Amino acid sequence: MASASPRRQDLLDALGIKYKSVPAELDEHFFPGELPRKAAERVAREKAEAVARNFEHGLILAADTIVVCDGKVLGKPQDEDDAFLMLSHLSGKSHEVITAVCIKDIDQAESEVESEVTRVYFRSLSPMEIRTYISSGEAMDKAGAYGIQGLGSVFVERIDGCYFNVVGLPISRVYGMLARRGTNILRNE
């Protein structure tokens, strides 16, 4: 897996998937005018390609998650002030969480990229709630500055779509992609 994300690792561990975590070292930038979904797909592919260079065989799973609100892409906050601005922007609105997934089959020299979109609805947040949440430390390593699986869940009124996508890995989609490559995780092969 081309990721050091503890959340993605937890999801794969819960499924009993055997993997090695090798973070991709690359600049996750977006190009001017690039559509958010296409940008996430490109970054996921680049992560898979970067990690695949270290292996001769096997499958590489890479993902990239972004949050989009009012057309603005929100990645991981750079600092607490940035996290405050992001959460203030999300307050009382809906936004999209886009996770792009790339499976690179080194043996077949093929890559498959898909993405999942989930709409998340936030309740209105007070500045005090935002500051308290940020002080927990949970906001700092997550796209959009919140984690739906932790304290950030209190901000979410509802979602339309895949919960696991918001966590960082759309499990059902990953299952389908792996199954097409001959890996059936239900049999733990």
Image: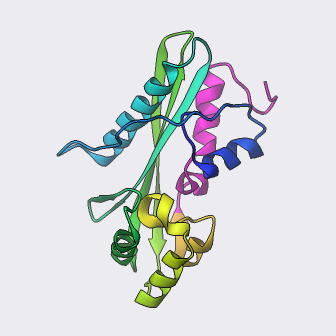
Q: Is residue 67 left or right of residue 48?
A: left
Say how many tags the image has.
0
Q: How far from the left and from the top, in percent, is residue 65?
A: 45, 49
Query: Residue 45 lies in what quarter of the image?
Result: top left
The vertical placement of 180 against 30, above or below, is above
Q: Is residue 157 above or below residue 34?
A: below
The location of residue 142, given as percent across then percent down, is 49, 59
**Residue 70, position as x, y percentages in the image:** 28, 65
Tell me if residue 172 is in the magenta stretch: yes
Residue positioned 48% across, 64% down in the render: 140
Left or right, 90 with respect to 163, comes to left
In the picture, the quarter occupied by the C terminus is: top right
Residue displayed at 57% across by 43% down: 4
Q: Residue 163 falls in which quadrant of the image?
A: bottom right
Q: Nearer the viewer, residue 130 or 115?
A: 130
Q: Residue furthest right?
A: 187
Residue 124, x across and y down, in percent: 43, 84
Image quarter (top left, top right, bottom left or bottom right) of the N terminus = top right
Colour mapping used in the image: rainbow
- Please report the bounds of the magenta region as a residue range: 160-189
Residue that extends furthest to the left in the rendered view of this protein: 32
Which residue occupies the foreground of this view, 19 or 94?
19
- Looking at the image, residue 1 sits to the left or right of residue 113; the answer is right
Q: Does the stretch in magenta take in 168?
A: yes
Q: Quadrant of residue 88?
A: bottom left
**35 or 142, nearer to the observer:** 142
